[in-house]
Amino acid sequence: MDEKKLAKINALERELAEVNKLIASEKQEVDLQKLLKRQNKLNIKINMIKNNKILSRAGKRNLIAYSFIAPNFIGFCVFTLIPIVFAFALAFMKWDGNNEATFNGINNFTKLATDTFFWAALKNTLIYVIGTVPLTMAASLGLAIVLNQRVVARGFFRTVAFFPYVASLVAITSVWSMIFHPSKGPVNYLLLTVFGVDQNNLPKWFSGSLVLLTFILFSVWKYMGYYMLIYLAGLQGISPELYEAANLDGANAWQRFIYITLPQLRATSFFVLVMLTINCFKVYDIAVMLAGGGDGKLSTSATVLVYYIYQNAFNYWDLGYSSAIAMVLFVIVLTVTLIQFKYEKKVDE
């Protein structure tokens, strides 16, 4: 053994001896635990130097664990973390993707104040979120309660309810486009023949003031099956004894729902609320597929924030301004999510 290793071992052994003395005299449990951890680390270091080991057994286990995590983490850094950081920086720049980027200060953000298209997109997005979230939650919970009962062909109906979520978006939007077609769709045909609505007054579901209603109805239909499964898992976690006790006390179905089902599903409902809100703020594909027409361009009444970000980035090549809009969307979603978490914490207390 060379002199350097011997000197290092001697220094570690002296430190270990001091730690052992402190352990013998220490009475505080917290401080004693810290000293014992320090003692263990020193013993490991001494054994590693004596046996010429680079890694300890715990170090090898950690290395194996990190090697499993590494591919996913590297992918996250390359495709998510680095682009997010770059987008934050780009929000303060002026860049068209071709010429050199120049610092633009907060001009991209001040421009938003006078951008009528941005405010229209923000308004449409908020209306969509406010309309979709509660309706989807109500529809999902209602389906879950019904299909949690012993009904005939329960598995079949669960599959049917879940099918829109896993089906191709292109296929189901094409079906909806045909169903709600202004002149050839069965919905307007029923309004014309059964309800006597004049042909000139038939609603145009994919333009004007009705387009957001169409988005909301489609989203509720598409996503309620997925969140139904989450509610089903929550319902099956409620103890049957609670319902049996309520029945013995004479509680009716509505009282059991209000005083047992809803409180027991509060954690599930909070999860659904947060995830659904975030997903609704990110709406893009539904809007383009339903109201984009042949060229995929949306009218002002159908424009949502994510589409406006895409439009500024890849139609106008104003990447700095599109990043600024993206940062505003990020702040809005973060604020709404933090408010939801704060409210949930307050309710728990």
Image: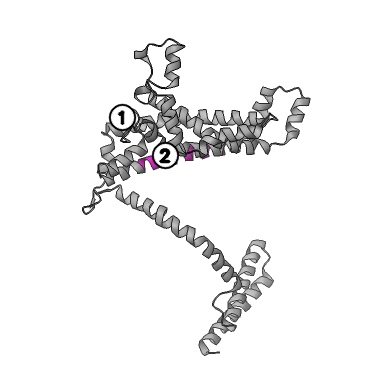
Please tell me how crowded label 1 is: few (under 14), some (14-19), or many (20+) other residues with Cα within 10 Å: some
Name the residue that disc number 1 marks: 300
How far from the left and from the top, in percent, is residue 161?
Answer: 57, 32
Q: Main secondary structure of the magenta part?
A: helix
Q: Which tag, 1 or 2, sits closer to the chain's start? A: 2
**Residue 229 x %, y %:** 59, 37
Q: Tell me where residue 266 appears, x and y as whole percent.
A: 60, 35
Location of residue 285 in the rendering, given as x and y in whole percent from the top left corner:
40, 38
Q: Nearer the viewer, residue 210 or 77?
A: 210
Is 103 contained in the magenta span? no
Which residue is drawn at the image coordinates 47% and 36% (left, top)? Answer: 277
Q: How many tags in the picture? A: 2
Q: Residue at x 37, y 52 (%)?
A: 83
Furthest toward the top, the residue is 196
Provide the residue span drawn in magenta.
Answer: 327-346
**Residue type at mark 2?**
Lys
Which circle marks residue 282 in the picture?
A: 2
